[in-house]
Image: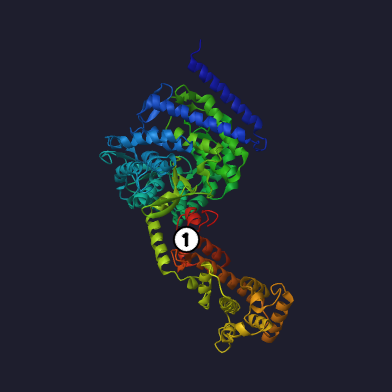
Amino acid sequence: MMKPTQKHNQANRHFAMLMTFLVVTQAFLPVQGRIISDKERLSYRDRVAAMFHHAYDAYLKYAYPYDELRPLTCDGHDTWGSYSLTLVDALDTLIVMGNNTEFRRIAELLIEKSQDFFDIDINASVFETNIRVVGGLISAHLLSKRSGMILEAGWPCSGPLLRMAETVARKLLPAFDTPTGMPYGTVNLRHGVPRDETTITCTAGVGTFLIEFGTLSRLIGDPIFEKVAMRALRALWEQKSSIGMIGNHIDVATGKWTALDSGIGGGVDSYFEYLVKGSIMFNIPELLEMFREYENVIVNQVKRDDWYMWANMKKGGITIPVFTSLDAYWPGIQCMLGDIEKGMKTIHNFHQVAKQYGFTPEFYNIPKAEVHQQRAGYPLRPELVESAVYLYQATKDPYLLEIGIDLLEAIEHSSRTNCGYATIKDVRDHRLENRMESFFLAETTKYLYLLFDTDNFIHNTGGKGTIIQTPTGECLIDTGAYIFNTEAHPIDMAAVHCCSAQKNEEDRILQEFHDNINLLELLDITEVNGNLIQGKKMKNNKKKLSDKDKKENVKSDINLGSQESIDKEDTSQKEETKAEKVENTDNSVLNNKTFSEFLKTVAASGMEPEEVEKLFEKYKIGELFNVENSTKDESIIHENISDSGKVLDKPVSEELKMQKTRRKQTISLAQQIINLFTKKSKDDTTNLDPPDIHKLYKKMRNYSLNYTYLPKFLHCPALPYHMKLSVMGEMFADEY
């Protein structure tokens, strides 16, 4: 009689054979995703949530406080540092899946034990501790408001989870004390770098710190973390070969490469990922320029028909024609940079490997179309579905949902045990290994859930946000501007910016702008009569104007019209301008002359007929001059203006018309902006209260759309997404 494990393995072998058969029979069929209904999609989402909680509950029951669960023997073991790694790594997934109650419970548990969690005499991986623990704690800290936790007054710039992240990160800092600035691979959490620590580490272990360390620096105000991360990135860049390639292992003491194979996968992957994400998150063009140079070399040296292989970093040329499962992050990066079509072609190739075996093996020989004998496992990795999430958000192609469905079904069929989910030891027969890495709960289940949960808060595209008050001023968060670190911990870019020195400087500039604003100079209006401002104030106070007041305001508007018609190119002081003609006109013409003479005066100012009609209606000109239907008698208006035009005998060119139109827009905008500065006080007198700055930004944005010139205070060198959405006012309520 076969044992249960033998039956399980036999069933897995049958499943693997079936998957291979299906791939072979479908290999020549066109890729065409079937339509998946919303009901079906949500059912898959719920299945992913159930998968997560089955594994999560098993970890708490059988493995905590060890780092990871062993799902075949239903116990736990320490792997990366003996600090309950899975608990920290899975924390923000609870928020993504909406389990706020459990998030609060575990967060309080971590906070209560924070003093003991990391004060241990044990050697820990610098890379893994950073991406899993520092990244996990920072993300949980920034998402804690969403969970309903009671927050400190200084949040998001302070908080117990953030202090825990800082504590751990400071324990990692000694690793960066090398001649090159590139970090050692291991530190002792109590004593620093071990005496016998090797100076050899992988490229990813050098270049995967900026997201976590840069975020930490900007949240707590200590630049040391961002500085060491940037120094390490630049050090790698300086060590690239003469043909622009990098290897996968380097000596951090000398900067010499010890492994010369160059590719996009294991040992290198997250270095490229952080160049792209770091450039976006912190607005550092230098990093994107680095990536683009690398990308050009990668395309020329290692890319073959949408496959990415390995080449010699010094000579080029393919050396290892394999696909590694870690390569599957690449389509997501292509998507982030807008290369959607390339990303879709690449992910299709990777998916075909997964369909052949049910999972992506660690190494796959591309020319032979077979699994590498020594690297045939699948440790429940997330990279393929990670890229599917990015591409699905960009395209909504149902084929990408099928990638998630295939992976979900395969994991449920072959990996599930009574105590969680086990690593696939060999994708060819689906034998199991007694390990469930923490990234299964931190990444794989999270990305699967986000693929099927299209309305998740993570997918917010800037249509809404939350305004919070902090000790440093007003901030906008929850805009959807999330950057995932390489362990899938989402970082709210807006919240990070809220605490940064950059924001403090912007606030200072903004306050200075408030205190010293000169709207007319800002809008390049130099010839507007002061009556304009006075007229708008009177209108805002809703005072009843006398006939005399109305006529005085008409005079002001005529002056505005004349200013609109001034040709900027005519700078001769000898020729009398239209504005001067109007200013020199006897003021009594508005009070004592006939309606016809008044029209000629208006026409001489250069105002268009349409403007005049609006002016009539605005000030009820007909009532002032006792002319019936004056606003409707277009023949009178056009006749008088036409006659006056003949007297002036100066044809209006298309360029002049454009200038006049733009000046009208400018003055109209100036009047609207001035309205923001005049508010009615209790005693019904004009009171220049501080303006609503968000309305002001909205008006100024409208101004910038019509002009190539942009006022200097709008040149904000800030983060993508957040600054575009908050500074420009696009994310505020409709009435703004």
Q: Identify the residue at image location x=61%, y=32%.
A: 40
Image height of 290 relative to 54, above or below: below
Q: Is residue 128 left or right of residue 703?
A: left
Query: Which of these two is toward me, 732 or 256?
Result: 732
Direction bottom: furthest residue: 574
Q: Identify the residue at image location x=34%, y=53%.
A: 223
Q: Identify the residue at image location x=38%, y=47%.
A: 156
Q: Identify the residue at image location x=45%, y=66%.
A: 683
- Mark 1 — residue? 692
Choose top left, top right, bottom left or bottom right for residue 651. Answer: bottom right
Query: Which of these two is toward me, 215 or 188?
Result: 215
Query: Which of these two is toward me, 224 or 102?
Result: 102
Total label count?
1
| Spot occupied by residue 536 in the image (x, y as percentages of width and height) | 53, 70
Direction top: furthest residue: 1
Q: Secondary structure at mark 1?
A: loop
Choose top left, top right, bottom left or bottom right for residue 47. Answer: top right
Residue 116 can be seen, yes or no = yes
Image height of 489 relative to 413, above or below: below
Image colouring = rainbow
Badge 1: residue crowd in 10 Å (few <14, some 14–19, many ≥20): few
Residue 435 can be seen, yes or no = no
Direction right: furthest residue: 635
| Spot occupied by residue 203 in the image (x, y as percentages of width and height) | 41, 44
| Spot occupied by residue 623 in the image (x, y as percentages of width and height) | 65, 75
| Spot occupied by residue 479 in the image (x, y as percentages of width and height) | 49, 49
Query: Which of these two is toward me, 110 or 684?
Result: 684
Say what amino acid the circle numbered 1 marks: Asp
Image height of 727 relative to 627, above or below: above
